[in-house]
Image: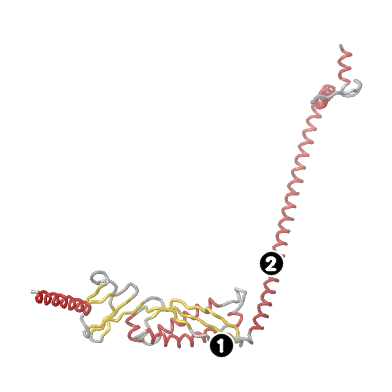
Amino acid sequence: MDGLMRTIGTLIIGVLMLVVLGLYAVTYQVGYNEKAMLKTFGEPRLVGDGGGIFGNLHFRWPYPIQEVIKYDTRVRILEGPEEQTKTKDGQSVVIQHYVAWRIEDPLAFYKTRRTVVEAREQLTTLMRDEFRNIRSGYTFDNLTNVDPDELKLEEIEEKYQEALQSLIDEDEGRWGIKIESVGIHRVLLTPEATPMVFAAMTTTQERLAAETRSEGESQADKIKAEAESARRRILSFADTYAKQIEAEGHRAVARQIEVFKTAEEFAVFLRRIEALEQILKERTTFLIGTDQTPFDQFEMVGAKD
């Protein structure tokens, strides 16, 4: 009985193993960062996104009828070697750059390059030749400069990326890859170029300082001119306003004089009373004769009494 149970157990395990091996032989998975192709009797065919069972699980015929080839489509970084080169003005520099690329069309990539290793080797050669052509059109100051108007690194990178992608697309059969970005991340000076760099930096700094001083002086002159113009406008307005007030005062005085002419004695009396009100506004003691104006009014009042 025990022997029978062991036999049944062994059979069950064997069947499960056959099922697992069978599923492995007729299914495959495609990751989120992958694209897959199926080779049916040696003829490759790109597998579209989706369409799998249980998510990203797909069926296939077992090998050798169908073979699955998968490519990682994430961005890859390929660094070029440090290479000494001559600039347009004959100066020596050591430049290192990189290219960020990824497999965009797995079917074209498989037909023309097959493996990532082969693609890297051919891309490295293409990078070196094309970058040499691009950078030879620029001067030393375009590569190393503190003046942003003279520095042309971004322009070089843009031209290099466009030229590299164009060569890849125009090549026979295409490569099936896309250049995502390129960059110059290291510019080294050779010993013979170092003194010239310092001299160029000094000249550039002196020129920038002169431009800054000139711009500052121009701004100062502009501010002074604006301040002088504002001062003149204010003085002109104040003078006009003062003349208007003066004219209004003259007119008011003229009106009062006309009124005073109708009762001169009464007008003089009112002026004297106003003067007394101003003098006696606070508690004050005066020793002054009643013959003094305006206190002579008290004497005049007493005389009338």
145 lies above or below 282: below
Q: Secondary structure at mark 1?
A: strand
Viewer-proximal residue among 78 and 161: 78
Residue holding disc 2: 215
Viewer-proximal residue among 301 and 287: 287
At label 2, the amino acid type is: Glu
Q: Where in the figure is residue 224, as x and y percent of width and height?
A: 73, 58
Camera-near label (2 vs 1) is 1
Q: Mark 2: few, some, or many residues within 10 Å (few <14, many ≥20)?
A: few
Earlier in the chain: of badge 2 and badge 1, it is: 1
Q: Where in the figure is residue 100, as x and y percent of width and height?
A: 44, 78
263 lies above or below 73: above
Q: What residue sits 80% from the left and 33% below the top?
A: 253
Residue holding disc 1: 85
Question: Quick check: can you spot residue 261?
Answer: no
Q: Quadrant location of the N terminus?
A: bottom left
Mark 2–mark 1 Cα distance, whole angstroms, equals: 38 Å
Viewer-proximal residue among 101 and 277: 101
Viewer-proximal residue among 267 and 6: 6
**Mark seen at residue 30:** none
At label 1, the amino acid type is: Thr
Q: How many marks?
A: 2
| Residue 192 image-quadrant placement | bottom right
Q: Where in the figure is residue 151, as x and y percent of width and height?
A: 59, 76
- In this picture, residue 74 sits left or right of residue 38: right
| Residue 121 image-quadrant placement | bottom left
